């Protein structure tokens, strides 16, 4: 991201009115050199996605975490994807207490609904089979930090062995 920002500002200037940065704020100081406004879309603070169990890991992450907070604060406008992320933003980025991010929910690809789907068999498999009265739905990205196994463990906790034939499990998502 930093390399691309340097390239855009110094090597191949573009005629952008605004720069929109998504998820990684490290490029913002370089984009600021363009004099154009910068919008940063924060999905979740990166510093919360790793554990710091050892002293070495804490020392390694300290400058990275500091830079994430500093560079995020350089954006002209900060967007977050939910009120939950807004609260996490405020509790994580202590030096940005005067910053008020705006909630902008991720949008849907509405064009995907314009065409009729030819594979009715696929969509029929998503509907509960006859006699299945419990639908258990999990929608996530398929990645380790989303802990999809937790959804299955929760299902197991709240379901007796007699109920298994009544359950229709749907785990939907995408690979990022």
Image (cartoon, grey):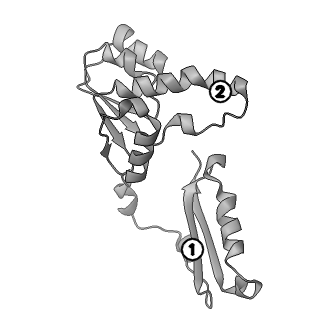
Which mark is on residue 58?
Answer: 2
Cα separation, mark 2 vs mark 1, equals 45 Å
Q: Secondary structure at mark 2?
A: helix
Q: Earlier in the sequence, mark 2 or mark 1?
A: 2
Dot 2: within a 10 Å radius of its alpha carbon, few (fewer than 14), some, or many (20 or more) residues? Answer: few
Q: Secondary structure at mark 1?
A: loop
Closer-to-camera residue (134/64) = 64
Q: Position of residue 131 (x, y in %)?
A: 62, 91
Q: Which mark is residue 57?
A: none
Residue 73 in picture, x, y percent from top left = 36, 27
Q: Looking at the image, is 35 positioned above or below residue 80?
A: above
Q: Give the residue furthest to the right.
A: 161
- Mark 1: give few (<14), some (14-19) or many (20+) Cα within 10 Å: some
Q: Which mark's residue is nearer the viewer, 2 or 1?
A: 2
Picture quadrant of residue 109 = bottom left
Residue topped by disc 1: 126
Q: Residue furthest bottom?
A: 131
Q: Residue at x 76, y 84 (%)?
A: 161
Rendered image quadrant of residue 64: top right
Among all residues in the image, which is located at the extreme top?
A: 10
Vertical comparison of 12 with 69: above or below: above
At a point 44% along the width and 41% down the height, the residue shown is: 91
On the picture, is 119 further left or further right than 96? right
The residue that appears at 61% across and 25% down in the rendered structure is: 61
Who is closer to the viewer here, 124 or 5?
5
- Residue 133 appears at what percent x and percent y? 59, 87
């Amino acid at each position: 991201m930093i390399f691309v920002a340097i390239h855009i500002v110094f090597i191949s200037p573009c005629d952008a009115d605004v720069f929109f940065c998504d998820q990684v704020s490290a490029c913002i100081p370089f984009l600021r050199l363009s004099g154009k406004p910068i919008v940063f879309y924060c999905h979740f603070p990166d510093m919360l996605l790793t554990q710091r169990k050892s002293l070495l890991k804490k020392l390694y992450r300290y400058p990275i975490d500091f830079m994430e907070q500093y560079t995020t604060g350089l954006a002209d406008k900060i967007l977050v994807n939910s009120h939950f992320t807004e609260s996490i933003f405020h509790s994580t980025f202590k030096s940005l207490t005067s910053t008020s991010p705006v909630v902008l929910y991720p949008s849907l690809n509405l064009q995907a609904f314009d065409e009729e789907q030819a594979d009715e068999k696929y969509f029929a498999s998503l509907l509960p089979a006859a006699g299945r009265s419990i639908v258990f739905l999990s929608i996530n990205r398929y990645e380790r930090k989303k802990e999809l196994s937790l959804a299955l463990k929760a299902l197991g906790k709240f379901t007796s062995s007699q109920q298994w034939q009544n359950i229709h499990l749907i785990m939907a998502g995408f690979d990022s």
